[in-house]
Amino acid sequence: MRNKIILFALGVLLPIAVLLIEAFTGVCKQSFFSPIPTPLHSALVATVPLGNLFLLLRTGNASYRPAPFDLLVAAIVLAISSVYSFLFLPLMPIAGMGMIMSIVSVFNPDMLVGLLGLCPLVPATSLAVAGILTRRILRARAQMKSASWFDALCSNGGLCTLYCFLLGIIWSVAPCNASYRLF
């Protein structure tokens, strides 16, 4: 039960909170770069907590039997969260220090430091939760001893293709006149 609560907090609640914070305040946009510059990016980022919630509810039952759709959702969540984790990778050490500073100075009225530390770390926590849930799916599929064409699609080659597709979408929709260029 405790593991479900931790996975729910790190994989669902925290990404939703950071998405709402970024949408309403633009903390990352003002400080680093805009991780959600368009509505398509917002929709892509919103699929991560929804996918994690779907997988958490599906794999939480004792009588869980994996479906091909579960692997597809896991692949999408892994792809999106890994792309955003890669984008925020240079900021993660600074974000960790910011989180430590905000925890140490809880009563400091300037909580922006904590928000700056939270935004870059959430894709990594979502990626870890999605990895744990994917491992649950794969263990359940191994116990069923079933293999299909969908297994090949969701293998490493299929995930690599999905990563390239999502990276192409993110790159092509990024505003051309932005002061930053990721690629």
Image (cartoon, rainbow, N blue to C red):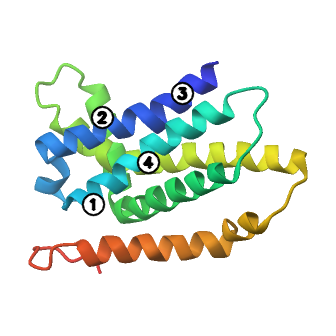
Task: Note whether 30 is above or below 101 in the view shown.
Answer: below
Q: Which amino acid does label 3 sit on?
A: Ile
| Disc with the residue nearer the chain's start (1 vs 3) | 3
Q: Residue at x 84, y 61 (%)?
A: 147
Considering only order in the chain, which callout, 2 or 1, is on the residue closer to the N terminus? Answer: 2
Q: Nearer the viewer, mark 1 or mark 2?
A: 1
Q: Position of residue 173 (x, y in %)?
A: 24, 73
Tell me which label, 2 or 3, sits earlier in the chain. 3
Q: Do the residues labelled 4 and 1 touch (CB within 8 Å)?
A: no
Quarter containing the N terminus: top right
Q: Label 2 near label 1: C-beta < 8 Å?
A: no
Residue 79 vs residue 182, the one in the foreground: 79
* Pointers 1 and 3 in contact (C-beta within 8 Å): no
Q: Upstream in the sequence, badge 4 or badge 3?
A: 3
Residue 40 got which mark? 1
**Residues at discs 4 and 3 in contact (Cβ within 8 Å):** no
Which disc number belongs to residue 17? 2
Q: Which of marks 2 and 4 is nearer the N terminus?
A: 2
- Pointer 4 local density, CA inside 10 Å: few below 14, some 14–19, many at least 20: many
Front residue of 131 and 39: 39
Residue position for label 3: 6
Q: Is residue 76 above or below residue 109?
A: below
Q: Distance between the residues labelled 1 and 3?
A: 29 Å
Which-is-in-front pick, marks 2 and 4?
A: 4
Residue 13 seen in the current view: yes
Residue 53 position, x and y percent, is 51, 36
- At label 4, the amino acid type is Val
